[in-house]
Image (spheres, rainbow, N blue to C red):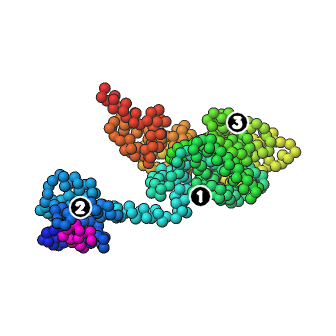
């Protein structure tokens, strides 16, 4: 029930409104009446109301003076002017005092009904907003940190469905993750050391948990979270790239020292590129993830930062390409193809010292397991046991052929222990279904996991067959589709607002959309739009 104060110097008008208003809208009740502005202010000092319905011409204190004084109160009730004066000067002055509506006498019930409904909807909306703000205010720090972690995880996984929900929530929580520059750093256990210590695979999650707990004690809570591989990911913010890299190295050194003293295990850090928009952190994560391959080349217990001009980048890209070829051969069921690729993989090693071979072997096992989430813990444990056969080479290092025999055996164990992949449809049909879903739902908050679920396969399996078939990743394909559709909209409707185009192609932030568009078309969407408009005029 909403409460109203009626202010009018005519008693008949006051009585009429007090009787009529509840009949017009049962949600409104005239709880007080006053004959002039002074009397109304005295009532307002004692009682709260939602709406003041006041005349303008009154003795002692007129309606406009009342409005002026009420406009300075907090909270301020809504105000509707009721007057027989159809003069612009009154309406203009009333607007400066925050008057919501202006009605003329004689009163028309339908007009009054519309105004009351409009005021009521406005009050409902305000109450809802205040309730939301209050809920956000009392939300515990743990809850806020949980939202931040889930959002950051959604960003690096390109999970648009979750981003669409959590991104607005961050604004309501008044959480600003990147003020100037930011990047992501991955902290990863050196699992080759774990295997050489004969620690059971089932115990590795315990060490990963310890790693995250130590990182959380050193870094601000909410900025530390897991990725899908249960690596510890840290959001680091600062003023510039040099500052960020220095912060990352300091954090890595502190965490590495703490976990080594606690467990005797070393960790590797990988630093992604700097970004100035939280929605671009997925790029920073992918760069950092690629830099983890530096561990194969240089050993663990180090911290590597991304640089497109790094002398190691060609070797990293070759390692990545070779692993994709191994996975492709396995997906094809072509033993000849994957054996050729494994031989090339082994030839990428500088030498066959045990630590080097262990690192390459662990990476091989991890990539095979990630390719198929149904690859069982038993299968991973079996693969690690095979890798530990390297311990028989204590007096002399293994030859390339020795290493190849062990790697071949690991891949055969993978085929033995991994659950069978889908056989009801071939890969071409699965990819065609995935592409069809993207074309139909690109404007919606979709993710690889959602698409995989729709067509009945695992996300990692779909990721691999999609990349193999289309020759680009799922996210690059989705981005290309969205950009092509955005350009099509801008060509067809040159006057359409950029923010509306951004929303129509599935982006939650126009800033992020503009950045991606510029990368794709080498110009901002506004400039593209202006060129299209000029072409149409020409």
Left or right: 333 with respect to 410?
A: left
* Residue sitting at x 62%, y 41%: 242
Q: Which residues are magenta?
A: 30-42
Q: Position of residue 177 (x, y in %)?
A: 53, 51
Q: Residue furthest right?
A: 395
Total marks shown come to: 3
Sequence order check: which comes first, mark 1 or mark 2? Answer: 2
The one of 97 and 303 positioned closer to us in this rendering? 97
* Residue sitting at x 47%, y 39%: 515
Sequence order check: which comes first, mark 2 or mark 3? Answer: 2
Mark 3 = which residue? 344
| Secondary structure of residue under mark 3 | helix
Q: Position of residue 391 (x, y in %)?
A: 82, 49
- Discs 3/1, front: 1
| Secondary structure of residue under mark 1 | loop
Spatial CA distance of label 2 from label 3 is 87 Å
| Secondary structure of residue under mark 2 | helix
Around disc 1, counting alpha carbons within 10 Å, would you say few (fewer than 14), some (14 to 19), or many (20 or more)?
some
Q: Considering only vertical position in the picture, is 535 above or below 432?
A: above
Determine which quarter of the picture holds residue 482. top left
Q: Position of residue 235 (x, y in %)?
A: 58, 50
Left or right: 261 with respect to 209?
A: right
Mark 2 = which residue? 65
Q: Was residue 405 drawn as part of the magenta stretch in this picture?
A: no
- Discs 1/2, front: 2
Q: Considering only vertical position in the picture, is 438 above or below 81?
A: above
Q: Residue furthest top?
A: 538
Spatial CA distance of label 1 from label 2 is 53 Å
Mark linked to residue 221 = 1
Q: Is residue 176 visible?
A: yes
């Amino acid at each position: 029930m909403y409460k109203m104060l009626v202010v009018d110097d005519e008693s008949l008008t006051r009585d009429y409104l007090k009787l009529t208003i509840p009949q017009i809208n049962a949600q409104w009740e005239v709880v007080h009446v006053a004959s002039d502005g002074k009397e109304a202010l005295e009532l307002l000092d004692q009682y709260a109301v939602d709406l003041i319905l006041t005349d303008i011409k009154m003795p002692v204190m007129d309606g406009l003076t009342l409005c002026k004084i009420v406009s300075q109160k907090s909270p301020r009730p809504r105000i509707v002017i009721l007057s027989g004066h159809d003069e612009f000067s009154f309406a203009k002055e009333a607007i400066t005092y925050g008057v919501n509506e202006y009605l003329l006498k004689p009163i028309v019930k339908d007009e009054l009904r519309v105004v009351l409904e409009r005021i009521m909807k406005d009050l409902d909306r305000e109450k809802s907003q205040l309730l939301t703000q209050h809920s956000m205010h009392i939300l515990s720090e743990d809850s806020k940190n949980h939202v931040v972690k889930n959002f950051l995880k959604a960003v690096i996984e390109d999970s648009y469905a979750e981003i669409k929900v959590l991104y607005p929530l961050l604004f309501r929580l008044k959480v600003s993750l990147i003020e100037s520059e930011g990047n992501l750093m991955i902290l990863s256990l050196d699992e080759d050391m774990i295997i050489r210590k004969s620690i059971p695979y089932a115990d590795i999650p315990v060490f990963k948990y310890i790693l995250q707990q130590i990182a959380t004690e050193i870094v601000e809570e909410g900025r530390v979270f897991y990725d899908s591989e249960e690596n510890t990911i840290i959001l680091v913010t600062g003023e510039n790239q040099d500052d960020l890299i220095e912060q990352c190295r300091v954090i890595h050194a502190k965490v590495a020292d703490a976990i080594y003293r606690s467990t005797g295990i070393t960790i590797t850090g990988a630093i992604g590129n700097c970004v100035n928009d939280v929605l671009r952190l997925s790029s920073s994560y992918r760069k950092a993830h690629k830099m983890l391959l530096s561990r194969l080349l240089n050993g663990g217990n180090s911290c590597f930062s991304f640089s497109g001009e790094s002398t190691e980048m060609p070797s990293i890209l070759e390692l990545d390409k070779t692993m994709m070829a191994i996975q492709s051969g396995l997906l094809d069921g072509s033993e000849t193809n994957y054996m050729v690729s494994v031989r090339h993989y082994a030839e990428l090693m500088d030498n066959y010292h045990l630590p080097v071979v262990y690192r390459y072997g662990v990476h091989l096992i991890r990539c095979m397991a990630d390719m198929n989430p149904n690859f069982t813990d038993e299968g991973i444990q079996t693969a690690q046991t095979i890798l530990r056969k390297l311990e028989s080479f204590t007096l002399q290092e293994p030859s390339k052929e020795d290493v190849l025999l062990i790697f071949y055996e690991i891949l055969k164990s993978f085929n033995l222990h991994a659950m069978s992949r889908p056989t009801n449809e071939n890969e071409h049909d699965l990819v065609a279904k995935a592409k069809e879903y993207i074309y139909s739902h690109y404007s919606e908050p979709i993710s690889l996991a959602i698409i995989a679920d729709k067509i009945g396969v695992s996300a990692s399996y779909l990721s691999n067959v999609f990349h193999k078939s289309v020759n680009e990743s799922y996210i690059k394909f989705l981005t290309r589709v969205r950009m092509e559709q955005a350009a099509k909209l801008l060509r067809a409707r040159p006057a359409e607002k950029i923010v509306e185009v951004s929303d129509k192609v599935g982006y939650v932030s126009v800033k992020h959309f503009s950045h991606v568009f510029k990368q794709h078309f080498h110009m901002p969407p506004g400039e593209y739009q202006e060129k299209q408009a000029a072409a149409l005029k020409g």
